[in-house]
């Protein structure tokens, strides 16, 4: 087994997974993300993502990936997760290449729900059963995006689910009701002025 341990392991790099990874890493948690790039976003064109205007789905993905990379998420593009199981103090995530451990796992595998099922997450109406925190019936395992919804498959909703999961993890790690609020001065002071570049 590799000695790679992350605070948060995210499985899936569509809008839900990338958003979870962004919030987690931006707020100081070591975050490892696996993705196989079969996101529905490559079939979509967004006119309904608030604040974006009109953008091709693949172009959206390119921007979103660059954004999470700029915050230091370790994104393992093309590495498929084959199994997720509970372990002492967290989870073991298995790929064809290696095994990794994480204190929290965020599942964001789109319409594929097999990993949640084998992990033992409760289902309701054929989707993973979560509340507004996105935590599943398995403590510290979260499910987000299309996998938790019978319908309402929208990118902005998936991204919101990922953000909610990460904020709940952050609340557990740093104290109740964690907020990720920035103000305009932060744009120039902290993260290389990324907001100024747009
Ligand atoms: C034709 C079409 C048009 C659409 N148009 C719109 C639109 O106009 N507006 C809108 O908001 N939404 C639209 N959508 C829906 C939108 O694409 C989805 O809501 C969104 O992609 C769901 O995000 P997600 O992160 O939950 O899942 P996905 O985007 O599907 O991402 C899941 C990711 O997980 C990865 N993955 C799965 N299993 C594993 C594994 N074992 N290991 C590693 N990685 C894994 C996949 O490769 C994939 O990249 C459209 C969808 C389609 C099909």
Image: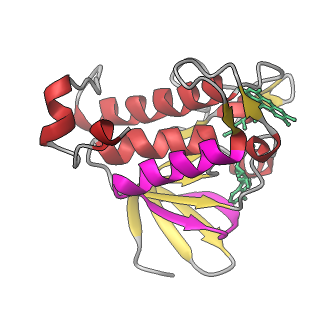
Task: Tell me, yes or no, if residue 183 can be seen here.
Answer: yes
**What residue appears at the point 42 percent right and 43 percent down from the top-left corner?**
22
- Left or right: residue 156 compared with residue 1: right
Residue 51 in the image, given as x and y percentages of width and height: 52, 20
Most foreground residue, 180 or 127: 180
Residue 146 in the image, given as x and y percentages of width and height: 74, 32
Determine if the magenta segment contains residue 77.
yes
Determine if the magenta segment contains residue 138.
no
Most foreground residue, 96 or 141: 96
**What residue appears at the point 59 percent right and 19 percent down from the top-left corner?**
131
Residue 32 in the image, given as x and y percentages of width and height: 46, 60
Task: Tell me, yes or no, if residue 134 can be seen here.
Answer: no
Q: Ligand 1 falls in which quarter? A: top right
Colour mode of the rendering: secondary structure
- Left or right: residue 145 compared with residue 86: right
**What residue appears at the point 27 percent right and 22 percent down from the top-left corner?**
176
- Looking at the rendering, the stretch of residues picked out in magenta corresponds to 58-87
- Left or right: residue 103 compared with residue 176: right
**What residue appears at the point 16 percent right and 43 percent down from the top-left corner?**
190
Farthest residue to the right: give it: 126
Residue 79 in the image, given as x and y percentages of width and height: 65, 70
């Amino acid at each position: 087994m590799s000695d790679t341990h992350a605070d948060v392991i995210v499985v899936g790099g569509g809008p839900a997974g990338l958003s979870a990874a962004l919030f987690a890493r931006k707020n100081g948690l070591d975050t490892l993300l696996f993705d196989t790039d079969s996101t529905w976003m490559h079939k979509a064109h967004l006119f309904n993502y608030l604040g974006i205007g009109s953008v091709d789905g693949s172009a959206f993905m390119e921007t979103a990936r660059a954004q999470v990379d700029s915050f230091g998420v370790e994104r393992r593009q093309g590495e498929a997760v084959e199994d997720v199981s509970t372990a002492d103090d967290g989870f073991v995530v298995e790929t064809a290449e290696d095994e990794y451990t994480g204190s929290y796992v965020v599942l964001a595998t789109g319409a594929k729900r097999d990993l949640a099922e084998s992990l033992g997450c409760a289902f309701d109406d054929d989707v993973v059963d979560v509340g507004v925190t996105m935590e599943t019936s398995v403590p510290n395992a979260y499910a987000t995006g299309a996998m938790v919804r019978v319908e309402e498959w929208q990118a902005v909703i998936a991204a919101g689910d990922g953000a909610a999961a990460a904020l709940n993890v952050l609340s557990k790690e740093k104290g109740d009701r964690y907020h990720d609020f920035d103000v305009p001065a932060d744009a120039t002071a902290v993260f290389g002025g990324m907001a100024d570049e747009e």
